Structure formats: C-alpha cells, structure tokens
Amino acid sequence: MNTKLIRILQKYLLVFFLYFFISPITYSQVNIDRLKQQKKKLEDSLINLGYWEAIVEIENDSTFKIEEGKPYLWSDLKVYEKDARISISSLDKQIGKQANQYILKKALQKYLVENYHKSGYPLAKANLTIEGLNANNVLASVYIKPQNYIVYDSLDIKSSIQSINSSYLSNALNLEIGRAFNIKDFRAINTKIESIDQINLSSSPTLKFENNKAIIGLDLIKETSNQFDAFIGLVPNGDEVNITGQVDTRLRNLFKRGVALDIFWQKYSANSQTLATSLSQSYAFKTDLGVSFDFNLLQEDSTFLQTDLNIGLEYPFWKSLTLGVSYKRQSNGVLREFSPEEIDDIAYRSSETNAIQLSADWNRAIYYPVLKNDYYLESAFGIGGKRILNYSSLPEVWQDVPENSLYFSTRIKLHFQRRLAKRFLIEIIPQYNFIENSALSQNDLLRLGGLQNLRGFDRNYFYSRYYTLLNLNYRYFLDNKSSVFLLTDIAKLQPVINWTYAFGAGLDVRSKNGWFRIIYALGNELDENVDFRQAKIHFGYIAVF
C-alpha cells in the first residue's frame, strides 16, 4: 500500500516539475518564434514599400528597431500580354517614382477591371516579377494572362410562379445571352432588381462558370404592388342628387415586362373633375431607356377645361440617379362667357403651352408607410413658349399681357424618413412648385389642397403661382405594416395668400390583401380662427394584389 502511494506521489511531483520548469522554456520559445514572424512581415512590408535595404532588429519582447535605408525607384517596367509587350500609361507614370508595389498593384488591378473584367475576361490576372536591383533601382516585369473569354448564358431563375419575362429581365440586367461577361453588371443586379416592381430577391445572386459561360442564378419572389381603390358618393343639391366618386388604380409589371399603368379619376363636385393617367415602361426596346406617356385633365365647374400631354424618356444614369427629358403640351380652354363684374375681378384666357422638361430623380418613391430609414428626391425643370388663343376677341382688360411669352416651371420634392426608436418614425416631406410666365391667368395657376398635398382642405382649394409645402408625419407602428400618426402641414403660397397650416391624426392598417386609411385633418389660414366644423375626414380602402 505504501509502495503504491509513493508511486502516485512521484507521478504528481513529475508533473509539477514539468509544468513549473519546462513551461517557461516552451513559452519563451513560442514568443521568440512569434517575434521572428513579425520581423519577417515587417521586412516584407518595407520591401513592398520600396525599402530594399531596410534592417529590422528585435530589441526586446515588444520592440523592433527599424532602419529604412534609401528608397529604391522603378527604373524599368515591362508589361507583357500573351508574350507580346504592351504599354500601360498608368504603369508608365510610375517610372522614376519610389518602387511601391502596393501602388503599382492597385493601378494594375484597376487596369484589369476596366480592360478585362468588364470585357469578358473575369478571370484575368497579372503577375509582378522583380527581375533585379541596380544601384537603388528596381527592374520589374508584369505578365498579364487574360484566361478564358466568358459570355453570359441564360438566367437560372428560381421562382414559385413566373413573375417576369426572362428575356425582359436579361435585358434590364444587361445579361443577354452571348454578351461578354462584365463583373460590373453582376454587382449591380441587386440595385436594378429593386427598381423593378413586383419582384425582389430572396437571396443574393449566384455566379458559376461552365464551358466558358457565366450562369447567373436568381431566386425571385413576387411582391404585391398593384393597387385599386374606388368609391361612389351621392351629394344632395336641392331637388337634385349629384354623383361624386373616385377611382385610383396602380398596375405594375403588366405583360410581365415592366409596363406600369396609373389611372386616377375624381369627381369632387357637381361639375368639377380631374383625370390623371400614366403609361410607362422601364428598359424599353431592349435598352436601358424608360419611356412614358402621361395625360391629365382638369375640369373646373363650367369655367375651364385643362389638358396636359407629356411624352418622355428616362435613363438610369448612375446608381439610383435617373435623368429624364420630356415634351409637354398644355391646353387651357375657357368654357363660358363672363359677366362684366367677373371680367374686372379675375382673368381667364384660353392658351396653349409647349415646353421641354428635364427631370432628375434619386431612388424610388415610397407608396405606403414602411418602418425603415429611407429617402427619395424628385425634381423637374421646364422651359417653353405660351400662346394665348383668340387674343383679339378677349375683353380689353384681359389684353394687358403679351400674346406670346416664355414659360418656366420648377418642381422639387424630397421625402426623408428616419426611425427615432424601435417603433417610431418621422417623415419629413418638403416640396416646392413654381411657374413663371408674364401672361398667367387664373386657369394657369397651380392647385393645392386635398389628401395628396395640403390635407385638411378641399381638393384644389387654393390657386397659386408658387407654393412651398412641408408635410410632417409622426408615426408609431403597431407592427411592421400598420401605424397611427399625427400630421402637420405648413404651406406658403404667393403673396396674396397668407401662410396656411393643417394638423390632425390618422391610421394606416396594412393587411395581405389591402390597405385601410383614415385621416382627420383641420386646415386653416394663419390669420383666421380655428373652426373644427371645417375639418376634413379622408378614408378609404385600397386593394393590393
């Protein structure tokens, strides 16, 4: 028993000895190896920076002594592609400069991307070889290997239903079959798909090469972006009943080719109605161009009828920036004769305006509340000519303006929203609208009022040559789709109209099949007393599919 105990004690004593006497030696050896590795990395880094004579010495456990020495210069850089010597201007500029391999490789990589990776050679690479050193000069050669020429194959689309035409999508993404592979186009897939309504990616795009062909894999999901809303109203008017109503339709990705159709019609009084239609397609005619056709109509009682026709082109210029140009033709027709009292009060003239309009948009507009940080910008600037019709037959007091005149217009809208807390969101929407013309009539002016802009007022309640409007919404999200909110609107119109404001509250409830909204808003001019009897209630249900 004693012998067994002695053996156990001897065993533990041996372990104790090894731990306390050999471990420091092992640790010291490991520390020395680590310092040597760091020294080697420093020496290699200094050489890559052009200090070929640099000396690195270990002084203690954490300190190195470095002597850089004289920097070496590039004296000769020879570039070869398929054994043929070529010249690259960005590399030629390095001759006589410090032999910094990091800068050289960066310039070389940029050259490869622009001349090979974007032209069907995504596997192209370049090798830098140091041929020799001569009196503080470095002689080097670069060997470029293009590798295989790669073209696009058909898209490998995974989706439960066919939500978009594959040929249209290939064109929109610049991935047509047989086209030279471009790494830039592959990296832009996410951004471009975000600009196409009704589809999105459930995962990142995949890329594989087979038999000199690039196969792009897309896992698509269908998103509901079509909307429809309609109602009919009956308004008593003495012994008669006037019919009012509204139809708001928003269809996206028609024919599975990115065609969009918007139709908005509203009859807001017995003889007043508005119609706005828009037909557009992005990436039309197998190009990056977008085309649009808009037609708008406004009938104000029996006073005038205004029509607008716009035909435009858009081009995705850079990232989320889209530039556009359009032709606008506006016709204003007076529908009735005016009494002498009316003639002295306000001028109405029939006219015709032709203008060219330039637009610049950043990001896509947001059509319903979303709990996330986001912003978008819409802007348009127009110039053209205006001609007054039947000028000689106008009342004399209305002939105080030129028959032909220049026309200018400006429209800017910014939508900015930011999360303030887990469920709180603030929306800040400033906008500015302006027209300049020396022959403006009442029927030429901008309209403001209603659910689309200045809430708490009837639609088209104000007429103005310009206005500045700020919409503020303070939202609390009940879940990711539904929210309650407070609202504030502030507007400054042309000098004859004072500052106006509105305040109120609302509720947005979004479900799988639709969107219910109710808004209570009270609008008022700054110098008037608040009258709660004038408050407006906007409500409706928008079907989403």
Image (tube, helix red, strand yellow):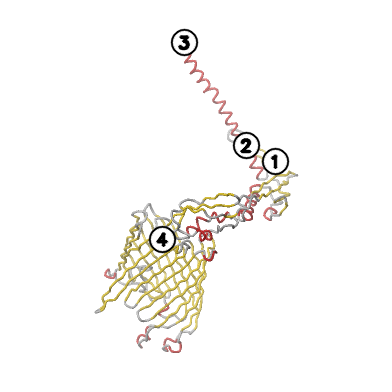
Quarter the C terminus occupies: bottom left
Residue topped by disc 1: 53
Q: CA separation, marks 2 and 3?
A: 53 Å
Of pointers 3 and 1, the one earlier in the residue sequence? 3
| Disc number placed over residue 225 in the picture, else none | 4
| Disc number placed over residue 3 in the picture, else none | 3
Identity, as a three-letter code, of the amino acid under mark 1: Glu
- CB within 8 Å, label 2 to label 1: no
Percent across and percent down for residue 339 are 35, 87
Identity, as a three-letter code, of the amino acid under mark 3: Thr
Identity, as a three-letter code, of the amino acid under mark 4: Ser
Q: CA separation, marks 3 and 1?
A: 66 Å
Is residue 77 visible in the rendered image? The answer is: no
Q: CA separation, marks 2 and 4?
A: 61 Å
Residue topped by disc 2: 39
Q: CA separation, marks 2 and 1?
A: 14 Å
Pick the residue in front: 480 or 118. Answer: 118
Quarter the N terminus occupies: top left
Residue 344 as seen in the image, left or right of residue 139: left
Give the residue at the far right of this rendering: 134
Percent across and percent down for residue 262 are 42, 68
Helix or strand or loop: what does disc 3 sit on? helix
